[in-house]
Image (cartoon, rainbow, N blue to C red):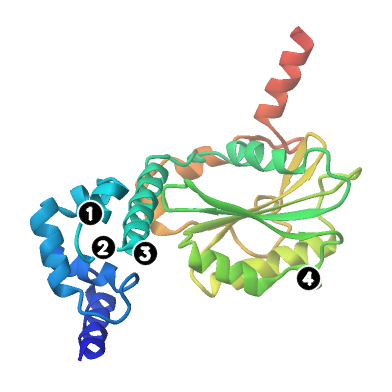
């Protein structure tokens, strides 16, 4: 009988979360993990009467919890573990991720990934609709070509992280910031892969020393630059200001600023 009741509670939670649940029902579900076989409904009612709220219960000391009838060591551990997990979650939500409004700001962030590397590496940068950073993951290391790029990992990471825009970047150690035929093929393949899940490839940057080459903007790749409508609407001047670059040398403005600082010093 208890198992059927628990099954219905689990199904109810999976359908709509805790919408419509009372506080004692939430505690009842939580206690399933520390009291695997007994009815936890009555104990949940008693705990709510004793502590008054879920917050008070979770913030109670281990000694206060252990003093309650029906609460053993496993339940004390469960409540304190839940409390500390929620603290960490709340702390993480207060951290505001950086927003990238220009390609030079994206470039500056990504170029730091390649400092001191003697081998080619590929990074995928995932952004939300506000162009704030969601994640930046390494896709491959070594010789970069279509065979070494994990397309499945790209789609899975993009979907799982709920990204709206992606930026690709890889380096040419001791080389030139200019795309090879293989680079163009990789760009096209990844752009097509992302397009199947409705996420545009914003740019593919090739990094070499203090130079950065934007493959899509250069027109050398057949995949056109595009942005989701939500991004364009949120910042009408975005497209006009995004490519803040020196078109003659394909060198970004922040590099010129760094060079000027060095000269003045």
Which numbered disc flags the more N-terminal residue, 1 or 4?
Answer: 1
Distance Cα–Cα, label 4 vs label 3: 51 Å
Contact (Cβ within 8 Å) of mark 2 with mark 1? yes
Q: Residues within 10 Å of mark 1 (few under 14, many from 20)?
A: few
Q: Residues within 10 Å of mark 4 (few under 14, many from 20)?
A: some
Looking at the rendered image, the disc whose residue lies closer to the viewer, 3 or 1, is 1
Looking at the rendered image, the disc whose residue lies closer to the viewer, 1 or 4, is 1
Residue 100, position in %: x, y?
52, 40
Which of the two residues, 165 or 240, is positioned nearer the viewer here? 165
What SS does tag 1 mark? loop
What SS does tag 4 mark? helix
Residue 234, position in %: x, y?
36, 47
Distance Cα–Cα, label 3 vs label 2: 8 Å
Q: Residue at x 76, y 43 (%)?
A: 114
Circle on res. 46: none
What SS does tag 3 mark? helix
Distance Cα–Cα, label 4 vs label 2: 57 Å
Residue named by callout 4:
146
92 to 71, vertically: above or below: above
Circle on res. 71: 2
Distance Cα–Cα, label 2 vs label 1: 8 Å
Image quadrant assignment for residue 5: bottom left
Contact (Cβ within 8 Å) of mark 3 with mark 2? no
Looking at the rendered image, the disc whose residue lies closer to the viewer, 4 or 2, is 2
Which numbered disc flags the more N-terminal residue, 4 or 3?
Answer: 3
Q: Is residue 91 left or right of residue 206?
A: left
């Amino acid at each position: 009988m208890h198992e059927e009741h628990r099954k219905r509670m689990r199904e109810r939670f999976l359908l709509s979360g805790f919408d419509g649940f009372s506080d004692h029902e939430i505690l009842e579900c939580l206690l399933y993990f520390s009291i695997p076989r007994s009815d936890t409904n009555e104990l949940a009612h008693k705990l709510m009467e004793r502590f008054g709220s879920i917050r008070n219960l979770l913030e109670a000391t281990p000694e206060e919890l252990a003093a309650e009838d029906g609460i053993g060591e496993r339940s004390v551990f469960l409540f304190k573990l839940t409390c500390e997990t929620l603290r960490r979650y709340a702390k993480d939500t207060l951290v505001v991720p950086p927003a990238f409004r220009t390609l030079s700001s994206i470039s500056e962030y990504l170029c730091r990934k390649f400092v001191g590397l003697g081998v080619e590496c590929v990074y995928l940068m995932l952004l939300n609709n506000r162009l704030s950073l969601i994640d930046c993951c390494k896709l491959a290391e070594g010789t970069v070509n279509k065979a070494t790029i994990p397309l499945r990992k790209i789609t899975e990471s993009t979907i799982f992280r709920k990204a709206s825009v992606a930026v690709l970047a890889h380096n040419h150690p001791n080389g030139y910031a200019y795309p090879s035929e293989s680079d163009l093929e990789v760009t096209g393949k990844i752009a097509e892969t992302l397009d199947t899940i409705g996420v545009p490839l914003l740019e593919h940057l090739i990094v070499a020393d203090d130079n950065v080459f934007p493959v899509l903007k250069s027109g050398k790749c057949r995949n056109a630059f595009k942005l989701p409508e939500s991004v364009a609407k949120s910042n009408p001047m975005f497209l006009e200001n995004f490519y803040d670059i020196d078109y003659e040398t394909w060198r970004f403005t922040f590099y010129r600023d760094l060079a000027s600082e060095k000269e003045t010093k």
